[in-house]
Amino acid sequence: MSTQEHAKPATTPEREEFYGRIGKKDLSPLWENLANLVTPQPRPICVPALWKYSDTRAFLMEAGSLITAAEAERRVLVMENPGIPGQSQITGSLYSGLQLILPGEIAPSHRHAACALRFVLEGTGAYTAVDGERVSMSPGDFILTPSWTYHDHGNTGDEPVIWLDGLDVPIVNLFSTSFANRYPSETQPVTRAEGDALALYGTNMLPFGYEVHGLNSPLFAYRYEPSRAALAQLARHGDPDPSHGFKVQYSNPATGRSPMPTIGAYLQLLPKRFDGIEYRSTDSTVFVAAEGQGYSMIGEQRFDWTRRDVFVVPSWIPVSHHTPDGEAVLFSFSDRPAQQLLGLWREQA
Amino acid sequence: MSTQEHAKPATTPEREEFYGRIGKKDLSPLWENLANLVTPQPRPICVPALWKYSDTRAFLMEAGSLITAAEAERRVLVMENPGIPGQSQITGSLYSGLQLILPGEIAPSHRHAACALRFVLEGTGAYTAVDGERVSMSPGDFILTPSWTYHDHGNTGDEPVIWLDGLDVPIVNLFSTSFANRYPSETQPVTRAEGDALALYGTNMLPFGYEVHGLNSPLFAYRYEPSRAALAQLARHGDPDPSHGFKVQYSNPATGRSPMPTIGAYLQLLPKRFDGIEYRSTDSTVFVAAEGQGYSMIGEQRFDWTRRDVFVVPSWIPVSHHTPDGEAVLFSFSDRPAQQLLGLWREQA
Amino acid sequence: MSTQEHAKPATTPEREEFYGRIGKKDLSPLWENLANLVTPQPRPICVPALWKYSDTRAFLMEAGSLITAAEAERRVLVMENPGIPGQSQITGSLYSGLQLILPGEIAPSHRHAACALRFVLEGTGAYTAVDGERVSMSPGDFILTPSWTYHDHGNTGDEPVIWLDGLDVPIVNLFSTSFANRYPSETQPVTRAEGDALALYGTNMLPFGYEVHGLNSPLFAYRYEPSRAALAQLARHGDPDPSHGFKVQYSNPATGRSPMPTIGAYLQLLPKRFDGIEYRSTDSTVFVAAEGQGYSMIGEQRFDWTRRDVFVVPSWIPVSHHTPDGEAVLFSFSDRPAQQLLGLWREQA
Amino acid sequence: MSTQEHAKPATTPEREEFYGRIGKKDLSPLWENLANLVTPQPRPICVPALWKYSDTRAFLMEAGSLITAAEAERRVLVMENPGIPGQSQITGSLYSGLQLILPGEIAPSHRHAACALRFVLEGTGAYTAVDGERVSMSPGDFILTPSWTYHDHGNTGDEPVIWLDGLDVPIVNLFSTSFANRYPSETQPVTRAEGDALALYGTNMLPFGYEVHGLNSPLFAYRYEPSRAALAQLARHGDPDPSHGFKVQYSNPATGRSPMPTIGAYLQLLPKRFDGIEYRSTDSTVFVAAEGQGYSMIGEQRFDWTRRDVFVVPSWIPVSHHTPDGEAVLFSFSDRPAQQLLGLWREQA
């Protein structure tokens, strides 16, 4: 179909009249829209943006007094990309929000076709239950709720707990494949001991005779401490990637693929005084600062970030990261695995 | 996230005021939109629809006198789903149109990230060139132009040639992964003899030491005659599937997967007096009658179709096919492979 | 472990005495055998060899008068590699023989863990039944009997039929994984029409919703005519590979992999006056001339072959093919797929 | 081919005379050997056997005074299965031995096509170097040296170190695919810090943008402590498998497959007073007791084992494990992955 060099055909009265007539028959002239449908480069509908945690947290605590987790089902403030207001999307393909659960609260059990990830930002004492196993949540933990698995959250501690949610809802809806339902009771029964999934799948071993089922990781909690320690080991002995510093991707230990088929998650350590070179790829990416502070150049714009701030880098816009004041750690997620599965992904260093 | 049983929280003045304030900070309350974002069942944005070939063809021939293939780049009338007018989409994830190329015309060479398929409806004498090989086009032929391969079309015969186009443009754009450009000259050089791809990949053999590259089929022309003969063989000796009759899927001979990662294509023979039972799946599907006539019940609506008519069955709406007056052959395509790669596809017989 | 440069340790009386003592405890000193166990290059136990069809055929016809197919179960003369007499092996990992079935005879139905291939050399009127479908056998046809599928052969014509058998028996036995049994009756019931498998799997289409089961091809008969025609098409328009001429590999249309997991099969056209350059690979290969005549240099030895002669090229011994007197077609098979699955295969052009 | 019910054809003088004549032409009658070639069930050439560590260790220490590691290249006592003496094989497809390295010794660097595994039985202070990284070896550690990777061992401590070696040499040689050579110097240079491979691949994360190369695990040291802790977690909360107790398989974290394509490795905890039920599979398996004591019934034979004893269970012979005196841990390895890749593996509980 079209390309930049292609000039849109001239408009004439008889063509106009023709377009009007065929429009009534649910037909339209491709040549009038070609340039917008098939663009020479990506035209992301989302724009670069940053949410300061200090702002969002204040609103979130205020929401805590306005509505209960039970009434809200999930007490989440959705980060809406300024380029697509009202769409409940942080990028063209992903949803993201910040969720608050207060001491004693329960977010009731449900399941849906959409895959969800959590990255814990603040507080301890909360848990997520998936497939009958409860895992406690601590800052920096990366937690999955795979497609179509019942999950509920609770806070049995004495402080507010806040995490970042990321879901592939826009992808699920593009394909018209949404399914969801509530669990009969508020919480699902606990049938496994905490740590069983880690013991079965997270120690470079698998159950004897294991067979892969589905595309989601059977390991659904990735603790921050070992992930962070791995980055430290790499940083002690190796050289950083010029664009990414020391960067790793969370992996499904049963396949080596991404934890979810649609969303990839990453953790990177930027050493002190790192001045990354520009990098771009087609997967619009959501970043949150897990440690430290710094700034990122997204295209021509500078975004200063500190711990727990969230920012977005749209498809194909060059980004570089900088840490003049000390090392920092960034967690990020994107639809890269989906793009790769569909043969659509590109990058440029 | 949400479910049907879940009641939307009550609206109060202070909540309204809060929503207004956080909106200015690009935040929104999930609980206000949850029911629309995460639905208990698919809510396709497209609706059942049918395009009579007699109507579309007349418009297409009129377009032939209004604009040249060269000026239009591609002279296509896009079938716009009535549920989403102005979107150049026939379903929530796919584009489809009818393309006309007149004797002596050339549709110039270009390439794009989007995958394209053609199903020839009328006329002989046209060709499609892909990767340096030209293949002639005859009614019933299924022809691919894989992602990022230069392709051009020409009509060296003496009659109009019309085919159905299907592309994954909405998927490419959801992910913001569109790339496209024109070939330096109007047509790409022919570097291989017609039939080479068929000889190399289409005879249940592969080149010695062959290695798979990419996700698209190296075989890009599937002739109607052998496909049709295969269906006839099955019909002579076997029993039809109660919903699908005798149905096969076009396959990438180098992998056994779909010819393109995002789009699957199918051919089915409905025997005379076939009364199919209802079937539904999450992949909204575009059908065109390659032979014969009949009708399909899509939900509660009846759509009568005859040769070359095009109709759409949206996600999760039950469909049944009926051929009271004689056997018929339906070609169809959908995003099923993409949904399966992403773990989203479901069906119900 | 060891290498050629490594000198075997000296033998001393006390070491001898020690070896004797530990031998009684089922122990042996690695250093005494290292050089033979872990060699710097392959040391195939088979040697280059050729079987003239004129000789073998005469013996086979004589066998036809000495024993019936029913009494023999399979009337086969095994080609025993001269390097390993008495082992019923043509290479270190494969079995091969020539099978004769006379008019009116039946080779009774059985199944086994071993995979078998047939390449028909002479005669028409015979059939092979696999999974309830009978396929007629004609010269040049390549026919599979996948692992653990019941199969029987019959000759309903009026002339002797002879084919080449290839099986992975030595591999099955190395792993101690042999299973076999007879079908309750002499022939299995015919439940499908001839051509069904070809219609379902052999036309670049697959059954709707097809899922791969197992590692063997669902297509079990590859006709000579289309394979030969594909080679002719390539030869008309392309340049031959300097070592292989025009060479293709039989493929499992449901996966693009070899028809059987352990054995690969190949067909190559050597144009007239072809003087191939040396090639070697680690898969010892069995060749049979399907058409024409020529000679092959295997290492330093020259082997002249004509139609239906069988010859063997051992692992890592360079081979070149030559056709001074006209074009020829070679069918070949080897354990290449097994070696590739296990990460052991190498080649050198 | 043949089956148990099949009677071997009668021998007659003229048949004998015929067999003699064709034998001279490297031909043999299949029907004379069919029953031995294609058996109704596996006929493993290896037999059940056990090596008491107390015996083997004494011989190994004696070997330490008879030959140096440098002279031996590898000071290993090969465990030769009593069923196949002189073959340097512990099963039909695998090699195993016990290796001793004394303080100050170096086993020089080399590489080979064969895959090797180590399971450390006694002593600390030794290291294995693979791909430029040295890993220290402690009792219970499972260490790989993948196919064609340079590796050397050294003992920088002050006590003897002994481990179990397992290699796929018989498989490599069946396929005639052996390659090997020495590294130019005695030890390869150390280019990575100890722990880098673990940090990059062993923490349920992978390097950013990682692509799988080859069939061997990039993680080559699996520590005993975390593996053992995982088993303890499972034992605290779950029920043992009736045959296997609590059993896991070592996994390639980049693929979820076995660490090597040919050999699988397993670790199982047998709780106190476990009385396992019979199990059999086609993969002849080598066991070593990592902890505790017990006995195993292999067919009708009882084998009592204690810590570090090695025993073999041949293909398809039922085995059951029993721990009357306290919990025990068994490490084991077999060719199961190779059998599964080739479609040959079976089991029966």
Image (cartoon, coloured by chain):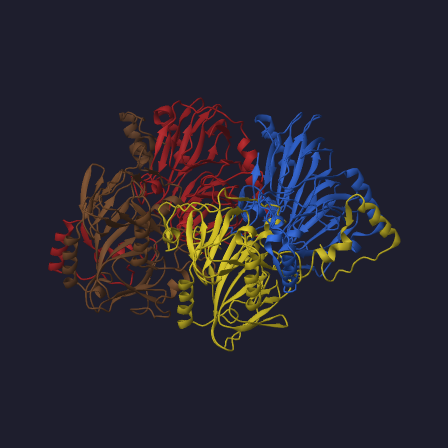
Chain colours: A yellow, B blue, C red, D brown
Horizontal and vertical percent for residue D21?
31, 33
- Is B6 rendered above or below residue C180? below
Task: Quadrant for the N terminus of chain C, please.
Answer: bottom left
- Res D116 seen here: yes
As drawn, B161 above or below C184: below
User: In the depicted view, which residue is nearer to us: C295 or B61?
Assistant: B61
Horizontally, is D225 left or right of B40 in the view?
Answer: left
In the visual, does A242 lie left or right of D53?
right
Instruction: Point out residue C309 in the picture as x, y percentages from the top left corner.
Output: 43, 40
Relative to residue A321, is residue A174 depicted above or below?
above
Is residue C207 visible in this depiction of the protein? no
Residue B13 drawn above or below residue D339: below
Q: Residue at x 28, y 59 (%)?
A: C2
Q: Position of residue A313 (x, y in %)?
A: 59, 65
Asked if residue B31 lies left or right of residue C334, the reply is right
Judging depth in this view, the residue of C46 and A294 nearest the camera is A294
Using the image as rendered, state which of residue A329 and residue A344 is in the foreground: A329
Q: Residue furthest front?
A: B13
